[in-house]
Image (tube, rainbow, N blue to C red):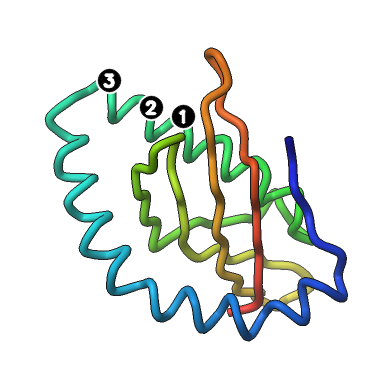
Amino acid sequence: MNVSMTPGALRGATHIVRNSLLAAAGMTLLVGTAACSGDSKDSGSSDRQTAAQAACYEEVKKKLTAPETAQFSQEKAESTNFGYKISGAVETKGDGTSIKNQYLCSVEQNGSEWMAVQVLVTPA
C-alpha cells in the first residue's frame, strides 16, 4: 500500500514534519546509531537495511523534479517492528539550480520485496 499526500496537504504538513524531523533527529541519531552498529555485525541485517533504503530511494525519486540527479546524504535508518524508518537529505540539480529536500520513509518487507508504505518529501 503506497500512501501519498496531495500538494496542499503536503504544504500544510511541512512545518509540522520539519519540526518533527528536527525534534526526532536527536532521538533518531541515538537510536539509529545503535541500530546501525548492531546491523554491521550481522550481514543479513545489513543486507535488509540496504534493500529497504533502495526501496525508499526509488519512491523518493518519484516525487522529485529531476530524479536522475538525486544525491542522497545524511541517511539515518531506524529498525522498527515492521521494517525501517529511513530519513535524510536529497539534493537535485536542474537549470543551474540546486534543490534540497528532506525525506522520511517507512519501509516494510512484503515477502522478499521491500515496499515504501509512507513517503514524505519536504523542502529543506
Neighbor class of circle 2 (other Cα within 10 Å; few <14, some 14-19, many 20+) is some
Residue at 58% in and 35% down: 55
Amino acid of disc 3: Gly
> Quarter of the image containing the C terminus?
bottom right
Q: Which residue is mark 3?
A: 44
Q: On the picture, is 112 further left or further right than 1? A: left
Q: Are marks 3 and 2 in contact (CB under 8 Å)?
A: yes
* Quadrant in the rendering for residue 107: top right
Q: In the rendered image, which residue does mark 2 sit on?
A: 48
Residue pictured at 34% horizontal, 25% vertical: 47
Q: Are marks 1 and 3 in contact (CB under 8 Å)?
A: no
Q: Which image quadrant for residue 48?
A: top left
How crowded pointer 1 is (Cα within 10 Å; few <14, some 14-19, many 20+) is rated as: some
Q: Secondary structure at mark 3?
A: helix
Residue on which disc 1 sits: 51
Mark 1: amino acid: Ala
Are circles 2 and 1 on residues that touch, CB within 8 Å?
yes
Query: Percent position (x, y) of residue 25?
Result: 36, 72
